[in-house]
């Protein structure tokens, strides 16, 4: 099924971060409110100004972003768990 998001919305897939070091030590994460990382798999056309011009999204497909826990609208599409968020809800882009 083809999907698309509208306006300043983004479709993201949450990334399950390893809670283990390379040597196998399990890390304890006491705060379950830490933000999540997600991969952007769908990008809307951007934001429309009052004058009718489009400002393109600053996030692109494949970007890894940081989103607060519990934000957005969860959605299951073709067996994949996705979250629809607005660009304003994105806290940042992870650069490697």
Image (cartoon, rainbow, N blue to C red):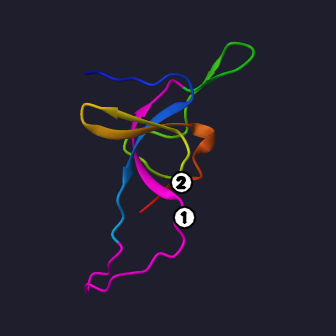
Is residue 38 one of those drawn in magenta? Answer: yes
Say above or below: 92 vs 34. Answer: above
Q: Where does the image place residue 84, in percent across and percent down from the top left?
A: 48, 35
Instruction: Kindly identify the residue that appears in the image at 45 percent across and 25 percent down.
Output: 5
Give the prevailing secondary structure in the magenta stretch: loop
Taking 96 as reference, is 69 left or right? right
Say above or below: 96 vs 72. Answer: below
Element carrying mark 2: loop
First along the sequence among labels 1 and 2: 1
Give the quarter of the figure containing the C terminus.
bottom left
Q: Where does the image place residue 34, in percent across and percent down from the top left?
A: 54, 64
Instruction: Kindly identify the residue that appears in the image at 51 percent across and 76 percent down.
Output: 30
**Label 1 crowd bin: few (<14), some (14–19), many (20+), radius 10 Å:** few
Numbered badge on residue 34: 1
Q: Are marks 1 and 2 in contact (CB under 8 Å)?
A: yes
Please report the bounds of the magenta region as a residue range: 19-45
Instruction: Kindly identify the residue that appears in the image at 49 percent across and 27 percent down.
Output: 44
Q: Where does the image place residue 47, in percent across and percent down from the top left?
A: 62, 25
Taking 62 as reference, is 48 left or right? right
Q: Which residue is mark 2?
A: 69
């Amino acid at each position: 099924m083809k999907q698309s998001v509208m306006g300043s919305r983004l479709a993201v897939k949450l990334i399950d971060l390893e809670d283990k070091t390379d040597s196998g030590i399990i890390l304890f994460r006491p705060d379950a409110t830490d933000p999540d990382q997600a991969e952007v798999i769908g990008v809307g056309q951007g934001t429309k100004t009052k004058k009718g011009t489009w400002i393109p999204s600053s996030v692109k497909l494949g970007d890894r972003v940081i989103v607060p826990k519990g934000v957005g609208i969860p959605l299951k599409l073709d067996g994949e768990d996705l979250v629809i968020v607005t660009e304003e809800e994105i806290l940042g882009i992870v650069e490697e």
